[in-house]
Image (tube, grey):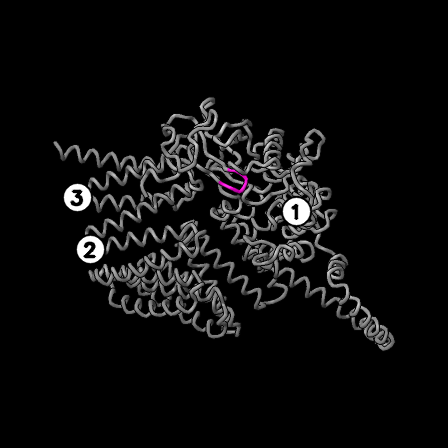
C-alpha cells in the first residue's frame, strides 16, 4: 500500500491525506482524489472523499473553508429525492438543529445544492475523527465491564437529552453510535426520529402506516406492530437494552438469521431473549437484571426513561441497590401461558386432577414430617451459610480477581483482595476443619500471591523469594489434595509446577526448570485422561511444551529442541486439521512452527527454517481472513514475515528477505495507525523498525531505509495530529523521525 492510498480515517473510504481540523496542512486540490461520479465541491464545501453510502443518501468527507474545519456532508442521492425522502431529509435537519449535546453529532448548516439533476438538499455535520461503532470500539480495546458501562452511560445521557427535546430516535443501534478518537460516543442519524412536540408538523410525513423503519434486531415489540401511535421514548429504551446486551456479551439476544421477516417479528414479540449469563457467566446478577428490565416486552415494565436506565447502571457501578428486580415466577408463568395457551390448559386440567388425588394421601404425612423438618432446618441453614461463604471465596479469587488484574488495578487493590480471601479461608478452616474445597481456595490464593510478588507475565513486585514461598505453599496444598483423591486438582498442581519452573528459567537454572516442566507435564496429562473435555487443560499443556522448547534453545540444546519440536509440530498439525474452525489451535500450530524455524536458524539450517516460517506465515495470514475482528492477527502476520525475512537473509536471499521485511513493516505501520491507543501496536513500530534499520545498514540498503521511514511518517502524521494527548504515539513518531534523519545524515556523509 502506498502512502497516498492510506485513508484519512481507518474506517472511511476517503482517498488522500487531507489536513487536520486546524487547517494547517495541505488540502488536496479540487478533484485530485475524486472518484467517478463524486462532485469536487458542494456549496462552500470541498469534497475529500466518501464516508458512507446508503439507499437514501451519501455522506461525504468535506472541508469547510470558513471556518476552516472538516465536516460530514450528507446529501440525497440523485434520483432518490422523492417527496417522502425530501420531507424526511428536512425533518432530520430540523430535528438535529434542536439538539445540543456533546454526545450527539452536531449539525452546522442545512441548505440546498444545485446539482446537474436539480436542487438537492444537504446538511453539514460534525466530522467524527477515528469513528468506530460503539461495539467495535469496545471489542478492539478489550474494554473492562466498568469502562463499557461508563461509555454506555454517556449514550443514555445523550438519548435522554433528545427525549427532553421531544425527539425519539427510533433507529438506535451500534452503527448509529460512533466513538471518536477521544473515546467519546456520538449519536448520529436522528433522521428517522419522531418528534413528540407540536412544532414539527412534518412528523406525520416521516413514515407511512405499516412501514418498519429501523433495524429489526433492535426494534421493540411495539415497533414491530408498525403502529406509530404506540411508539414513545420507551421504544428507545428497549433499543438501548439490546445495545447494552451486545456491548457486554458481544452477542445479540435473538438469532434472527435466515428467518422470514414475519417469523423474526414473532420472535421479538413473543420469545424470551437469550440471557447474557448463558454467554458469559460473569454477567450474571444485577447487571443482567438491568438489561432484562430495559428489554421487557411490555413498555410499562421497562425503565420509563433513558435517564432511569442510566441511573440504575450508576447504582450498579457504585455497588448500590438497583431499581430493577429479577422477573417474578408469576410473571414468567404469565408469559409462558400467553405463548402456549392450549398446552397450558391441558396441563392445568391434568395437574388439577392429580393434585386433588394427592391431597388426601398427603395430609397424613404432613404431621409426621413436621418434626423431622424442624431438625433438618438448622442443618440446612448451616450448610447454606457454608456454601455461600465458599461461593464468595471462589468468586474473590476467580472472575472477580481476574477482572481486577485485567483492569490493571493498583497492586495494593490486588493484595487487599487476596489478603482478605486467605484470612477468611483460614478462619473458615478453623471452624469447619481442612475441607477439600477450602484447601483448594487456599492453594489458588497462594498461587495468586506468587504471581503478585513475581511473574514472567503481568505486573508484579519483583520479589522472587516471596513468590517462591507462596508457590511452594500452593504446591504443598495441591499435592495433598491430589493425594486425597481430589483428581480435579491435578490441573492446579500442573499450573503451580509450571509457575515454579518460570522462576528457575529466569535464574537460568535450566536443568531445574526442565525437571519442574516434566512434573507439570505428567500432572496435566493425568488430568486430561480423567477430564478429556476440559477447555483450559490443553492450553496449559501447550504452554508447558512451548516453554520446554524455549528452555532447550536457551541451553543450546538445539538437537533436543529439534526432536521435541518435530513431535509437537506433528501433534499440533493433527489437532489443527481435526478442528479447522478452532482458531486457537490454528494459532498454536503456527507458533510451534515459528519455534521450529528459530531452532533451524540457530542450527544455520536456513532452508528448513524458511520452510517452517513459510508455513507459519501462511497460517497467520489465513487467520486474518478467518477472524477479521482480531486486532492481534495482523501483528502475528507481520512478525511471521520478519522471521521469514531473517531466515531468507541468512540464506543470502537478500531481495526476498527485504520483500518480506517491507511487507511486515507496512503491516506494523498500518496497525499502529488503526490502533494508536494500543501499546503493542505502538511499541511494535519501534521494535520492528530498529531491527529493520540494522539489516538495511548491514546490507547497504540506505535508500530503502529512507523510503520506508518516510512512508511511516506520512501515514502516522495525521494520526498523531488527530490524537494530541497520545504522548506515547508522539514518542514513536519522534523515534521514526530520528531514524529517518540518521539515514539522511549518513547518506550526506557518504556523498562527501
Q: In this image, 487 relative to 37: left or right?
A: right
In this picture, which residue range is highlighted in magenta? Answer: 53-57
Distance from disc 2 to disc 1, alpha carbons, whole Å, reads 61 Å
Residue position marked by numbered label 2 in the rendering? 650
Q: CA distance from mark 3 to mark 1?
A: 63 Å
Which mark, by number, is residue 700?
3
Q: Going from the N terminus, do you reach mark 2 or mark 3 first?
A: 2
For residue 112, side relative to residue 332 (left or right): left
Q: From the image, tell me which residue sits under label 1.
A: 238
Q: Residue at x 40, y 44 (%)?
A: 679
Q: Position of residue 446 (x, y in %)?
A: 49, 59
Q: Quadrant of the N terminus?
A: top left
How packed is label 2: few (under 14 Cα within 10 Å), some, or many (20 or more)? some
* Quadrant housing residue 512: bottom left
Answer above or below: position of 690 versus 640: above
Name which residue lies at 25% across and 59% down. Answer: 610
* Residue 32 spot, x, y in % from top left: 36, 32
How far apart in space, not on screen, are marks 2 and 3 (Cα)?
A: 16 Å
What x and y, as percent, mark residue 99? Answer: 61, 31
- Reply above or below: 269 against 605: above
Closer to us: 545 or 12: 12
Amino acid at each position: 500500500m502506498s502512502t497516498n492510498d492510506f485513508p484519512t480515517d481507518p474506517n472511511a473510504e476517503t482517498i488522500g491525506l487531507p489536513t487536520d481540523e486546524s487547517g494547517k496542512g495541505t488540502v488536496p486540490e479540487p478533484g485530485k482524489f475524486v472518484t467517478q461520479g463524486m462532485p469536487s465541491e458542494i456549496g462552500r464545501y470541498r469534497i475529500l472523499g466518501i464516508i458512507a453510502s446508503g439507499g437514501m443518501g451519501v455522506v461525504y468527507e468535506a472541508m469547510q473553508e470558513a471556518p476552516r474545519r472538516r465536516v460530514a456532508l450528507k446529501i440525497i442521492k440523485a434520483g432518490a429525492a422523492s417527496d417522502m425522502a425530501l420531507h424526511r431529509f428536512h425533518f432530520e435537519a430540523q430535528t438535529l438543529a434542536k439538539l445540543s449535546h456533546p454526545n450527539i453529532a452536531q449539525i452546522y448548516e442545512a441548505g440546498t445544492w444545485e446539482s446537474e439533476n436539480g436542487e438537492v438538499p444537504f446538511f453539514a455535520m460534525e466530522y467524527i475523527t477515528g469513528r468506530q461503532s460503539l461495539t467495535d470500539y469496545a471489542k478492539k480495546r478489550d474494554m473492562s465491564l466498568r469502562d463499557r458501562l461508563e461509555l454506555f452511560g454517556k449514550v443514555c445521557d445523550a438519548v435522554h437529552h433528545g427525549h427532553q427535546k421531544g425527539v425519539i430516535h427510533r433507529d438506535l443501534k451500534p452503527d448509529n453510535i460512533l466513538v471518536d478518537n477521544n473515546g467519546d460516543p456520538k449519536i448520529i442519524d436522528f433522521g428517522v426520529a419522531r418528534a413528540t412536540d407540536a412544532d414539527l408538523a412534518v412528523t406525520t410525513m416521516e413514515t407511512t402506516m405499516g412501514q418498519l423503519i429501523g433495524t429489526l434486531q433492535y426494534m421493540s415489540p411495539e415497533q414491530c406492530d408498525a403502529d406509530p401511535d404506540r411508539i414513545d421514548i420507551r421504544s428507545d429504551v428497549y433499543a438501548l437494552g439490546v445495545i447494552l446486551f451486545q456491548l457486554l456479551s458481544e452477542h445479540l439476544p435473538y438469532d434472527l438469521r435466515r428467518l422470514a421477516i414475519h417469523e423474526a417479528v414473532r420472535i421479538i414479540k413473543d420469545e424470551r431473549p437469550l440471557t447474557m449469563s448463558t454467554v458469559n457467566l460473569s454477567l450474571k446478577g444485577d447487571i443482567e437484571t438491568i438489561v432484562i428490565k430495559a428489554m421487557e416486552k411490555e413498555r410499562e415494565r421497562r425503565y420509563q426513561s433513558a435517564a432511569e436506565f442510566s441511573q440504575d447502571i450508576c447504582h450498579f457501578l457504585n455497588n448500590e441497590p438497583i431499581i430493577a428486580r429479577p422477573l417474578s415466577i408469576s410473571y414468567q408463568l404469565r408469559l409462558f401461558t400467553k405463548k402456549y395457551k392450549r398446552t397450558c390448559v391441558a396441563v392445568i386440567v391434568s395437574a388439577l386432577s392429580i393434585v386433588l388425588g394427592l391431597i388426601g394421601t398427603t395430609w397424613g404425612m404432613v404431621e409426621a414430617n413436621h418434626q423431622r423438618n424442624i431438625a433438618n432446618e438448622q442443618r440446612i441453614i448451616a450448610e447454606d451459610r457454608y456454601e455461600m461463604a465458599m461461593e464468595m471465596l471462589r468468586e474473590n479469587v476467580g472472575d472477580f480477581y481476574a477482572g481486577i488484574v485485567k483492569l490493571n488495578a493498583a497492586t495494593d487493590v490486588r493484595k487487599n483482595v487476596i489478603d482478605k480471601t486467605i484470612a477468611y479461608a483460614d478462619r473458615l478452616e478453623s471452624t469447619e476443619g481442612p475441607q477439600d474445597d477450602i484447601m483448594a481456595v487456599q492453594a489458588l490464593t497462594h498461587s495468586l500471591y506468587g504471581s503478585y510478588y513475581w511473574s514472567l507475565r503481568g505486573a508484579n513486585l519483583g520479589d522472587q523469594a516471596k513468590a517462591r514461598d507462596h508457590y511452594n505453599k500452593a504446591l504443598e496444598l495441591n499435592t495433598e489434595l491430589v493425594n486425597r483423591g481430589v483428581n480435579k486438582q491435578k490441573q492446579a498442581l500442573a499450573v503451580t509446577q509450571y509457575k515454579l519452573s518460570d522462576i528457575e528459567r529466569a535464574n537460568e537454572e535450566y536443568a531445574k526448570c526442565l525437571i519442574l516442566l516434566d512434573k507439570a507435564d505428567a500432572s496435566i496429562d493425568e488430568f486430561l485422561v480423567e477430564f478429556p473435555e476440559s477447555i483450559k487443560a490443553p492450553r496449559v499443556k501447550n504452554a508447558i511444551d512451548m516453554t520446554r522448547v524455549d528452555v532447550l534453545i536457551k541451553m543450546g540444546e538445539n538437537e533436543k529442541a529439534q526432536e521435541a519440536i518435530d513431535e509437537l509440530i506433528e501433534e499440533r498439525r493433527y489437532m489443527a486439521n481435526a478442528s479447522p474452525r478452532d482458531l486457537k489451535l490454528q494459532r498454536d500450530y503456527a507458533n510451534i512452527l515459528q519455534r521450529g524455524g528459530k531452532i533451524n536458524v540457530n542450527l544455520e539450517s536456513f532452508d528448513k527454517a524458511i520452510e517452517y516460517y513459510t508455513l507459519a506465515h501462511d497460517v497467520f495470514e489465513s487467520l486474518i481472513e478467518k477472524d477479521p475482528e482480531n486486532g492481534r492477527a495482523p501483528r502475528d502476520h507481520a512478525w511471521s514475515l520478519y522471521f521469514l525475512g531473517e531466515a531468507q537473509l541468512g540464506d543470502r536471499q537478500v531481495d526476498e528477505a527485504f520483500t518480506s521485511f517491507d511487507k511486515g513493516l507496512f503491516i506494523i505501520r498500518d496497525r499502529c495507525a488503526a490502533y494508536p491507543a494500543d501499546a503493542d501496536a505502538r511499541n511494535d513500530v519501534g521494535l520492528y523498525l530498529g531491527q529493520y534499520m540494522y539489516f538495511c545498514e548491514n546490507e547497504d540498503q540506505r535508500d530503502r531505509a529512507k523510503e520506508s521511514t518516510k512512508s511511516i511518517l506520512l501515514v502516522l502524521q495525521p494520526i498523531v495530529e488527530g490524537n494530541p494527548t497520545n504522548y506515547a504515539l508522539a514518542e514513536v513518531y519522534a523515534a521514526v523521525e530520528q531514524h529517518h534523519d540518521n539515514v539522511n545524515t549518513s547518506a550526506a556523509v557518504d556523498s562527501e
